[in-house]
Image (cartoon, grey):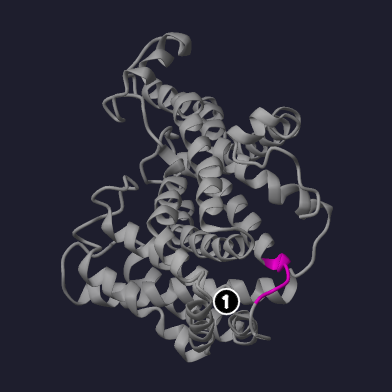
Amino acid sequence: MDNLVTERKYYIDWIRVLAFFLLIFFHCAMPFVIFGWEVKNKEQSLALSRLIWWLHQWRLPLLFFISGVGIYFSLEKRSIIKFAGERIVRLFIPLLFAMFFTIPLQVYFEKTQKGLIHQSYSSFYPTVWDMVPYPDGTLTWSHMWFVVYLFVFCMLLLPVFGIFKINFLKKLLEKFSLVLSHPIASCLLVAPFIIYYFTLYLKYPEQQSLLDDWFLFISSLTLVIYGYVLGRSNRFWENCEKYRFIYLAIAIISIIILFYSYWWNMNLPKQKGNSLYIYGVVNSIHTWCLIMALLGFAKRHLNFSNRFLKYVNQAVYPFYILHQTLIVAFGFYVVQWTMPVVLKLLILIILCFGSLWLIYHWIIRPFMLTRILYGLKPKENLSK
């Protein structure tokens, strides 16, 4: 079908790369905002807190959607069994390695800053093998919760993916994706998120714990499914590009309402009522329309490849796995310095990106074992 995506879309790679880089900035800012985190600066910025809260509304929803698109492309080239095996190797193995060998360093610096422990890391590290979950113990998946959720989604949806490998049902899904690609139909896809706000938002506040985290779990699963269904349709991408300014305008209007009524003073809904219903509708529209606008602008301006994209497209997953551990470790010392928040943030960003590149380029990238442990294919693929 002419309206199905068949060739590589470089703007999808750019979206993924830029979204993960934004995530690194997001976590570099966390020591300096009013929300709790592993290490904290004494002085905190309310303006930065507002920016970070806004980014939090859409950065990971965008990544879950792009992950769904990636699942579609992956399944086009491999069987269900091969797909499942690849998810285990590229998601589950890096997750376990991070939980036991890199993330404990975050817990060490957090508990040290809070005065809960007074010992060297070599003395602290063996506590991870007590297998006691954080916060009472050391074992945690921390920022790798995204990988946990994505892995669980892939495993849960395997029967669905298998069903749509059947040629007749695959063609039905392709026709359905074209229907949903109509701009009005695409906008109506915001409806489930509004329902989740009305029914789950207050009862199941975001925990990133997989269990008893239904608002985040169902919302993220829905976005993965949307990516899997819509990502195959050229018509969807074309409409995102065609109507990108309209989607952006809707998102901006929603942002103004949200900041005025809720975010400027962090006055979020705490009980059912008109405040929750308005928030659920407006924030759902904001998030989904902003995602479609970003997809449209990326298609318009970023459908090209170069050496930088080829390099960072493979580097971004190891960067993600390592970034928060490095930020916490550097941040533990940076927050103790006497200087303005902006300067500390800039230094932390430089330290994070610089160390990530050094570790990736000289330790992870060249060796088969480290490539596997950090979610890469055993051999580098220079064609992508």
| Callout 1 secondary element | helix
Q: Position of residue 208 (x, y in %)?
A: 35, 47
Residue 127 horizontal/vertical position (percent): 36, 16
Q: In this picture, which residue range is highlighted in magenta? A: 5-11
Answer whether residue 49 is magenta in the image. Answer: no
* Left or right placement of residue 173 versus residue 339 in this view: left
Along the line of sight, which residue is nearer the eye, 188 or 55? 188
Name the residue type under label 1.
Ala
Residue in the image at 37% along x and 46% along y: 35
Residue at position x 44%, y 31% in the image: 99
Question: Dividing the picture into quarters, in which one does residue 287 lie?
Answer: bottom left
Q: Quadrant of the C terminus?
A: bottom right
Q: Note whether 174 is above or below 49 in the view shown.
A: below
Q: Is residue 340 visible?
A: no
Secondary structure mostly taken by the magenta-highlighted segment of the chain: loop
Between 20 and 222, the residue placed more toward the observer is 222
Q: Magenta segment: does it hold 9?
A: yes
Q: Quadrant of the N terminus?
A: bottom right
Which residue lies at the image location 40% right of the left edge and 69% below the top edge?
259
**In this view, 37 is above or below 120:** below
Q: Closer to the camera, 212 or 80?
A: 80
Per the image, the residue denoted by label 1 is: 293
Specify the quadrant of the image occupied by residue 43: top left
Q: Nearer the viewer, residue 200 or 332?
A: 200
Judged from this view, the residue extending furthest toward the left is 272
